[in-house]
Amino acid sequence: MSALCPECSAPLDADPRFVAWCASCDWNLLPPPAPPQRLILPRLQERLVRGLHESGIDRFSLARLASYALALLVHLLTLGFLVTGIWLLFVFTFASVCVGVVLVGLSWLMRPRFGRLPGDAEVLTRQDAPRLYQLLDEIGARAGAPRTDVVVLTGDMNAGYGTYGLRRRRMLTLGYPMWLVFTPQERIALLGHELAHSSNGDNRQGIVVGTAFRALAELRSAARSDREAVPEHGLLVLVGNWVSQVVLWLLRVAVGGFDTVLQLVNLRSSQRAEYRADAMSVEIAGTVAAASSLDAHDTRCGVASSFLETRTMAIPRDESLWEAMQAYMASIPESEFERRRRGARLVSLRVDATHPPSYLRHEYVLGLPYREPAVTAAGMGEIDRELEVRSGRVERELRDDIRATLYQ
């Protein structure tokens, strides 16, 4: 006899592996959430996020222009530190040299950083995966994206697109578990979405705004101080330590406040960029695949992530982790996917997030004119074989990372 819902007496799902919940009244749909930390008030956040969802996705928004203006102020501050520091060094008094060294050091910490390819990355070149790059070139041509230079295969349930180095080489980061969870046509939608970020106004990884974020992070890190003077050092040292702590605290508050403003302004722009990328995904992969790929983020990706986090260590080394994950996914009842789907709609709307909620993006995609796929998944089997060759190392690194977290 199946258990009954304590709220409406309807039968509950009986699969013991998952949360028991009621499909009739949504009892026990989600566990009690931890209080989220928000940058602004919840109701205002919801109004802003929904307002963006309903107002359209114009590319040149006031928020985008404001993010560039604020980022330029950060770079001007870096230049100001450098110029002032050098000038003080040439004044050549003890105090001016001390302050000058500090300012030049801060300008060095805040210098623009253009990123680099991780040294231990599993890199796929065009020679390693010619069929994958052929598909990327086809999708990129339709998305107006530059030619992809490097594909990095990871064990993350995620994908991303960005640049690295002074030459701004284009890098696609592809999570192999996500690739396995998605259907072939959903993969087209995923790639279309990511490549669209090269030309849709997403400036978080850009040369102006992206480097400003990294500069502020370095400045905040430099302003941290956990050192405390001990009483044996004397009153003068204690007073000096107290004064320095106050100065560093004021610096952290000022930098933190500016960083918060830049985050809020730019995250608004980033959420617009996500909608634009979704629209391009529809144009390339078709409405059905674009919508189902967004649904997969809340359903299949969540289940697969939980499996990898909790079950990886139980899979023997001589057995394929990827095969075990796919077998597990095939056993998941639809009721668990539906629970996650409904639960995603209850998540608080936050403007301080880079992505709008998946269900709002899903609604947006379905509200666009219906499109048939412009790029199909023909030849996906060849791409699977190219990736499978390199998936062994990805699996080993994922296992090692999970094992390392157990001993932290």
Image: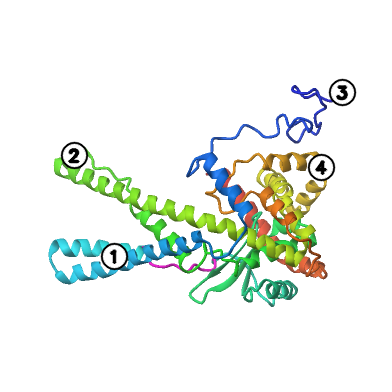
Nearer-N-terminus badge (2/4):
2
Tag nearer the camera, 3 or 1: 1
Q: Secondary structure at mark 3?
A: loop
Distance CA(mark 3)–CA(mark 4):
21 Å
Per the rendering, the mark at residue 1 is 3
Q: Secondary structure at mark 4?
A: helix
Q: Position of residue 323 (x, y in %)?
A: 78, 53
Distance CA(mark 2)–CA(mark 4):
67 Å
Amino acid of disc 2: Glu
- Outermost residue toward the left? 93
Tag nearer the camera, 3 or 2: 3
Residue at horizontal 83 percent and vertical 27 percent from the top: 11
Colour pattern? rainbow
Name the residue tied to disc 1. 81
Amino acid of disc 3: Met
Residue at horizontal 65 percent and vertical 52 percent from the top: 399
Q: Secondary structure at mark 1?
A: helix
Nearer-N-terminus badge (1/2):
1
Per the rendering, the mark at residue 232 is 2
Highlighted magenta segment, given as a residue range: 110-118
Nearer-N-terminus badge (3/1):
3
Nearer-N-terminus badge (3/2):
3
Amino acid of disc 1: Phe
Left or right: 231, with 52 as reference point: left
Q: Say if 10 sits above or below 132 in the image.
A: above
Amino acid of disc 4: Glu
Marks 1 and 2: CB-CB under 8 Å? no
Distance CA(mark 3)–CA(mark 1):
73 Å
